[in-house]
Image (cartoon, coloured by chain):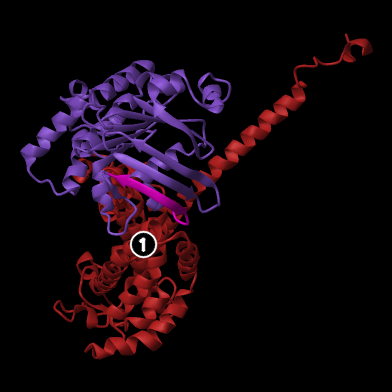
Chain colours: A purple, B red
Amino acid sequence: MTAVPPPPAPAIAIRQLFFTYADGTEALRDISVDIAPRQLFVLFGPARAGKTTLLRLLNRLSDLIGGTRQQGHVRFNGADIFERGVDVTDLRRRIGMVFAMPTPLPGSIRSNLTFGLRMAGMRDAAALEARVEQSLRQAALWDEVKDRLESSAFALSGGQQQRLCLARSLALEPEVIILDNPTSGLDPLSTAAVEESLDALKQRYTIIMVPHSVQQAARVADSAAFLLDGELVEAGPARELFVNPRHKRTEDYISGRFG
Amino acid sequence: MTATPAESAVPPEPTAPPRAARSSRLLAERVIEAAIALAGVSTVVIVALIFLFLLRESTAAFLDVPLRQLMGTRWYPIEGLFGFLPLIAGSLVVTIGAVVIAVPLGLITAIYLGEIAPPSQREVLKPIIEVLAGIPSIVLGFVGWVALAPLVQQLGATTGLTALTGSLILAYMALPTIISISEDALYAVPKAYRDGALAIGATQWQTIWRVVLPAARSGIVIAVMLGIGRAIGETMAVMMVTGNAANIPALGPGLFLQPVRTMTATIAAEMGEVQRGSLHYSTLFAIGVVLFVITFGINYVAGRLIGASGGPRRRGQL
């Protein structure tokens, strides 16, 4: 009798989450799903399914929009992130985010990387320098920019900017990285480079990603969830979900019948 | 050798428009282009003409009054003493006071409106602030004279009509310009900058101070310069509340509590009384030339500051 090891406690547990925008759009309805640690979790579905809304709730960037209503819980390592008294900036350091369009800040490559650290109170120049190199290596950008860390971040190509944004999140040594369609503006080669670095990164980080396509989702995901019109249709290990979807709508979407 | 009726009756090619119509459209195009070019050039020409006119009217002053006297410290036109320094000093003191009050206040208001206030408040506040810009300066001068001057006198001035009173009124007049244009500049900063900074754990204030403000810098510099321009050129309100004494204010803690007289107020007050073509008349135009040059100087500095914001100075800002 071999004992089945219990599944690891989820890094993020979403329970009965509802979210409505000020104009009355119900972006999310009754979402419940577990995201396991140190895995690549993919959140896919057609446009306006609520993917970005859900991602922005996870690090509370949704706080910035006025007039919204929400209900339900998101537990990060067991603690509810919506509770009063949660330190939002600390939460965002622990749950990093990379957006669909690269968002370099006006300034040099180096200052983009050290900005978050300095805002967090890190002053030691040597330590900052170490983080710069480490995060650039993790994002597979070091070799391309190591000789021009002082030049403007805007001088980088789109793919490099996107990897810079990834490195910027990694520099904070987060626990979770959220990627909202990180390869949308990238050519196939840069896309491959990013996907490859994701594979290495998920050894250390929990990654939540909205993919560019179903194909990309199937390529990179360990587990996945299919969202449609603000509802979670199904979630599970990628091997099952992409091969033997339980729901007709998932199957139709995966096989390209709509979307 | 005349064309036969049959030839001239050949219908034109259906695809190409008739030649006449095409050339008239081309002509219309040229006329519009020329009109736009004319409008653009005319602004420059008018500025140049104004400057030439000022120069012509002030030639006598620059030729007949020795430069040493023009740089003198006494303005007694009746006695033939035309020293500009008291007037320039008066304008400077009042304007600097106004800038010191209006710029921080205006920027803080713009940041509140653009970055912190909920949309509902912003929609109410912004139009009200823009209405402030439309209050006639004479009304503000009156308010300053009736309401502000007694308060300033309580600060220990011998009279309520002082440089400080003028600065306060001017600051109030420059505020709507500074607020409105800085707020537009903040609004033009891409949302991605804020998202990017917040997502790596910057607080809202860190995001505003370290990312949004530097990105909006050129617009903010324009706002401040336009505010200063408004302050230095203002006449009526200042004339009513600064006491109009053409002295060089004594330096010291009481600098702002002395009556002063600005360049603009001098021109406005004396232009009606001088004989056209007299030396005094010409000197007033010379004051106008000085004002013009100062305004140009401010615009030039503003241009340089904006130009620099894209350059190396930007590097250390993040």
Please name whichever residue, B145 or B204, is drawn nearer the observer in this view of the structure: B204
- Residue A215 screen position, x and y as percent: 44, 19
Q: Does A13 appear above or below B49?
A: above
Drawn side of residue A9 relative to residue B184, left or right = left
Is residue B60 visible to the viewer in this orientation of the structure? Answer: no
- In this view, the residue farthest toward the front is A1
Q: Where the C terminus of chain B falls, by quadrant?
A: top left
Q: In which quarter of the image is residue A139?
A: top left
- Residue B107 screen position, x and y as percent: 32, 61
For the record, the magenta segment spans A65-76
Main secondary structure along the magenta-highlighted residues: strand
Q: Is mark 1 on a helix, strand or loop?
A: helix
Residue drawn at the location 33% of the way across and 45% of the way down? A59
Drawn side of residue A12 relative to residue A250, left or right = left
Residue drawn at the location 88% of the way across and 8% of the way down? B1
Residue drawn at the location 75% of the way across and 27% of the way down? B21
Which residue is identified by label 1? B112
Please name whichever residue, B222 or B189, is drawn nearer the observer in this view of the structure: B189
- In this view, the residue farthest toward the right is B5
Q: What residue type is labelled 1?
A: Tyr
Disc 1 is attached to a residue of which chain? B
Q: Does A60 appear above or below B127?
A: above
Q: Does B26 appear above or below B264?
A: above
Q: In which quarter of the image is residue B308?
A: top left
- Residue B105 screen position, x and y as percent: 31, 67
- Residue B301 screen position, x and y as percent: 28, 52
